[in-house]
Structure formats: C-alpha cells, structure tokens
C-alpha cells in the first residue's frame, strides 16, 4: 500500500483497520492516534508507541461499528 492512500482512507473514515505482515491480528488506526509518513506508520497506544513500515501493510479497510455506518439501517 502507498502512504498517501492510507492517509486518504484514514481521513475519509476517521478510523481504519490495517493488516500488517508482522502481526496476526489487524490493527485499528484513528485520526487522533496514528501518524503516517512516506516510510512508516506510528501508532500511539495506551502503554507505548508502535511503529511499523508502510511496506509491511498488506491491506486496509474501513472500520465500522454498525449497520447505519454502512447505510444499511
């Protein structure tokens, strides 16, 4: 994935799920806790900071919480 594509998705949705090659579970990014630059993603967690390379992101999708978020209500 490209950094600008991830940034656009995050800004459009406010939050984003990403699959990262180094982790078994997807990670949730929010506008207030994630910084994306050309090389890496920096995610602030309650107990520290997680940084991973953009090249390790294997997929990204909109994170939703309800049917209404998808317009299916």
Image (cartoon, helix red, strand yellow):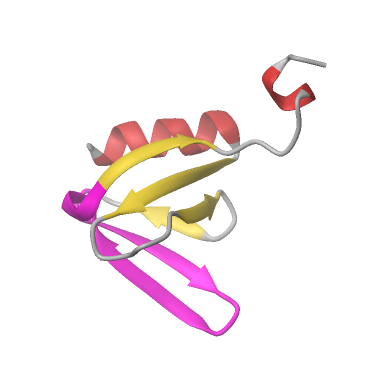
Kindly identify the residue that appears in the image at 54 percent across and 73 percent down. 45
Q: Is residue 20 above or below residue 46?
A: above
| Prevailing SS of the magenta stretch | strand
The residue positioned farthest toward the top in the image shown: 72
- The question of residue 36 being in magenta is answered with no
Query: Which range of residues does the magenta coloring cover?
Result: 38-57
* 63 horizontally vs 23: left or right: right
* 34 horizontally vs 2: left or right: right
The image position of residue 61, as x and y in percent, is: 45, 34
The image position of residue 27, as x and y in percent, is: 46, 57
- Which one is in front, 15 or 17? 17
Q: Is residue 56 above or below residue 22?
A: above
Kindly identify the residue that appears in the image at 23 percent across and 57 percent down. 21
Q: Is residue 66 above or below residue 28?
A: above
- The question of residue 49 being in magenta is answered with yes
Q: How many marks?
A: 0
The residue positioned farthest toward the front in the image shown: 24
Kindly identify the residue that appears in the image at 72 percent across and 26 percent down. 69
Instruction: Pick the quarter of the image with the C terminus.
Output: top right
Instruction: Pick the quarter of the image with the N terminus.
Output: top left
The residue positioned farthest toward the right in the image shown: 73
For residue 13, which quarter of the picture? top right
Kindly identify the residue that appears in the image at 38 percent across and 38 percent down. 60
* 59 horizontally vs 56: left or right: right
The image position of residue 2, as x and y in percent, is: 22, 37
């Amino acid at each position: 994935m490209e950094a600008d594509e991830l940034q656009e998705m995050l800004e459009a949705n406010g939050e984003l799920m990403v699959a990262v090659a180094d982790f078994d579970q997807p990670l949730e990014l929010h506008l207030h806790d994630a910084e994306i630059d050309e090389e890496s993603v920096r995610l602030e967690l309650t107990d520290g900071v997680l940084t991973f390379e953009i090249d390790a992101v294997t997929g990204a999708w909109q994170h939703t919480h309800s049917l209404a978020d998808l317009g299916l209500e």
